Image (tube, rainbow, N blue to C red):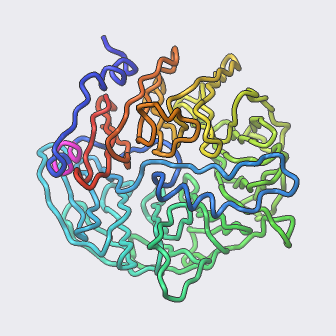
Amino acid sequence: MKTASTRWFAAYSWLLMLPAWSCMESDLSSKASGDAYGGEGEGEGEGEGEGEGEGEGEGEGSADPYEPEVESAYTALLPAATDEHVFIANPDRGTVTRVEADGLGVDTVSVGLDPYVVRTTADHSAAVVFNRGSDDVSVVDTATLAVDQVPVRPDFNQLLVSPDGRWAVAYHDAERRTSGDLSDDTWSFNEVSLIDIQARTHIPMVVGFNPRKVEFTADSARMVVVSDAYLAVVDLTVPEPEPVRVPIAEDSVEPPLAEEVVLTPAGRYAIVRQFGGTSLVVADLETTEVDWIDVGDSPTDLDVTPDGRHAIAVARGSNELWVYDLDDIFAEPEVVALPEDGVWGSIVMSPDSSRALLFSTASEVSRYASWDRTTGELDVHTTVKPIESISMSPAGDTALLFHARANGDTDPESVFYSEYAVTLVDLDDHFSNPIRLPAEPTVLAHTEDTDLGFIIMASPHRSQCPYRLW
């Protein structure tokens, strides 16, 4: 019997490229669940340049000379799935396509201009589409394809839906910004739009300059928005939700910019990472009281382990991992020294929380480190190019390393020089299988049973076309 890891590696020996239009409307749409692995953002051209520009203001006296890490995940045009259908946005046509999972029947409905993000609600009753070109949200009935339009504030580029499917939030995510996003109109960089999906209404909110990340608590009782210097906490259980803005910068003159927020599983605390700092902000969401906990020098990534037991911060400046017990966030953290032969700024956890991979999007160095949390062992491995993003297979035994066209320390004679690439890594023995790609990958998707996986690539010649992974 082939293991999941074997299927991943065998896949590229018979890598399949399907015709562009037919693969979008049949094979991919009928199979891909639309799950993606990794952080928020897009590919090289959209996430990298903006992420670097927005992250200036490194802590004074920091020994870390690198730009901020850029979390790149392949979620642009990500299909959204229900138990019966897959919904795919068609930006150039102003439509959304519904594909039947069983019969492969295809229906298309008009929404707004440049539909950019599509999500489905938890009860599978609605597909929620953000239309970047017309500044509105389309709520599509998944059964009848009836469409209701909800206007939102202008010039947003991101949409999230609460876990219970009651709420959506649209905002401008600077890490997803492209050159055409900033219109010539009057702009407010402090606002988000909260959409009541049931009532089809919109509530504009001022949350703080440059909202960066939005999180909902698991029970959908609160929404938390982190901006440069504020944390906005919104109670979603009251008739008229409104933000409570909580200052999170100790230095009001030159505050470190907040970059990331995570919530503890019980929803009591929000933990905020600020670039260039030496502490993490801990905000009590019930009392809005703010405290700080030590984190080492220049934290560049912060994640909650999939099992919900720990938060792990990468302190790139001091070359350490700081591991916090989420049952007692203020307890003394475990500090893990990282290998000296590399720069480590980003972390990706396996689904079972037993291991992690560390890398850097800022160092331009072609290597990653593997951390076995059971044994504590840390090993360094080289790659064909610097790493832009890492995703884990559903079983957690294989990693998929994405490489942008940027070369870093890549040998000019390499067949991967100035090319897109992915590398499959067997995490049992770290055997790698690097694959050169003809175009930029935009989406990583898999079937619900995880037996089939796809990378979708954007190309002027192939439109959006999937390559079968495993």
Is 27 within the magenta? yes
Q: Nearer the viewer, residue 143 or 440?
A: 440
Q: Quadrant of the C terminus?
A: top left
Q: Is residue 174 visible?
A: yes
Is 7 within the magenta? no
Residue 75 in the image: above or below residue 249: above
- Badge count: 0
Q: Nearer the viewer, residue 380 or 94?
A: 380
Based on the displayed image, in which of its 4 quarters is residue 188 positioned? bottom right
Residue farthest toward the bottom in the current orientation of the protein: 186
User: Which residues are the magenta region?
Assistant: 24-30
Q: Nearer the viewer, residue 124 or 446?
A: 446
Residue 134 in the image: above or below residue 160: below
Percent position of residue 239, x then y: 54, 77
Q: Is residue 432 left or right of residue 118?
A: right
Residue 2 in the image: above or below residue 373: above
Residue farthest toward the top in the current orientation of the protein: 1
Q: Nearer the viewer, residue 3 or 232?
A: 3
Percent position of residue 355, x then y: 60, 26
Which residue is drawn at the image coordinates 70% and 55% (left, top)? Answer: 270
Q: Is residue 247 left or right of residue 197?
A: right
